Image (spheres, grey):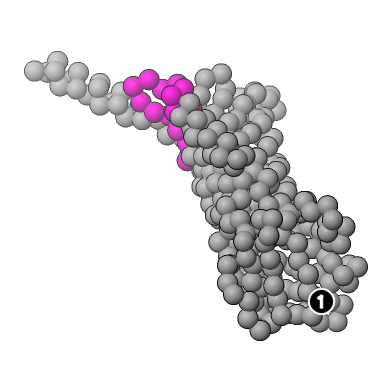
Amino acid sequence: MSKFILIFAFFITSIWACGQNEAPGGQKFSVGLKAGPSISWLSFADNARAPLFGTEGKVGFFVGGVIQFPLKHNFTFATEFGYAISGRRITFNDGMWENNATYNFLDFSGLLRKSYALRIKKDVYTAWFFSIGPNVKYWISGKGEVKTQALGQPYTVVFEGTPAADFTHNYVNDINRWLFGLDLGIGLEGRINRNQRIFTEFRFTYGHTYFGKKNSTSHMELLGFDDNLLANMKTLSLNLTYFFDFDTRASKLGKSTKDKEIKRKR
């Protein structure tokens, strides 16, 4: 039920944002390119089995685009979309084994931002801001390696497949490929010139959806292999976004002025 609430909130916020844009007779918006590293870890849900597993930080990154609309009172609404690499590093069998999994995601966010002026240097516009909004990930694919102190076995993730007697596939069944969460961020904004800005943001993504459902399974044909998909992902990221600002009012104003000049000449 909570994921539907998040989706509903996302669309309501989007509609509200578009209706609150400050540019009558035109549209002000910004388009940005975003990238940055991340580190993720797990939170286990199964109280009975959770003590059998440990979690380590998994390094990843995000690259994608941003569309941002200005609102009233120094608020903005941003829609982010892109490609993310993250995953899971879990230990089991008394910490002697490790499952180091790398996952590929499509990543979407809808963020409401509030900015505050910050005077760092005279005649140079800077501001700090905080962001909040829903995050949605779609689990595309995955691979990994199961390691002991002596050996390692690489594998490819197979979604909803029938387990076979091979060592190179991890068959995960009854899983959640749509993962929902909440983004919280704080950062700095600086202006490069009249139409270009740069954002640096430190963000925490609180993953809500578990990778697996109640009866999910994760199978590899390795004696001693164990897994726990009843876990959600928490992520810290450092993002850099380069924005280009656009104002369609300017082009409409120019066209209107030219039309008036032509009428005068007639």
**Depicted 39 relative to depicted 203: above or below:** below
**Depicted 211 relative to depicted 125: above or below:** below
Is 108 placed left or right of 232 in the picture? left
Is residue 195 among the parts visible in the rendering?
A: no
**Residue 207, image x, y percentages:** 68, 46
Q: Which quadrant would residue 226 be assigned to in this image? A: bottom right
Q: Is residue 24 magenta-colored?
A: yes
**Residue 12, image x, y percentages:** 50, 30
Within 10 angstroms of label 1, few (less than 14), some, or many (20 or more) residues? few
Viewport quadrant of the N terminus: top right
Instruction: Write down the region rendered in magenta.
Output: 17-31
Q: Residue at x 51, y 24 (%)?
A: 71
In this orientation, which residue lies closer to the viewer: 230 or 126? 230
Q: Is residue 258 magenta-colored?
A: no
Q: Which quadrant would residue 59 be assigned to in this image? A: bottom right
Is 156 placed left or right of 259 in the picture? right
In this orientation, which residue lies closer to the viewer: 181 or 197? 181
Q: Which residue is mark 1?
A: 224
**Residue 241, image x, y percentages:** 58, 44
In this orientation, which residue lies closer to the viewer: 104 or 63? 104
Residue type (three-letter) at the residue carrying disc 1: Gly
Q: Residue at x 77, y 51 (%)?
A: 45
**Depicted 228 relative to depicted 189: above or below:** below
Q: Residue at x 82, y 76 (%)?
A: 224
| Residue at disc 1, secondary structure | loop
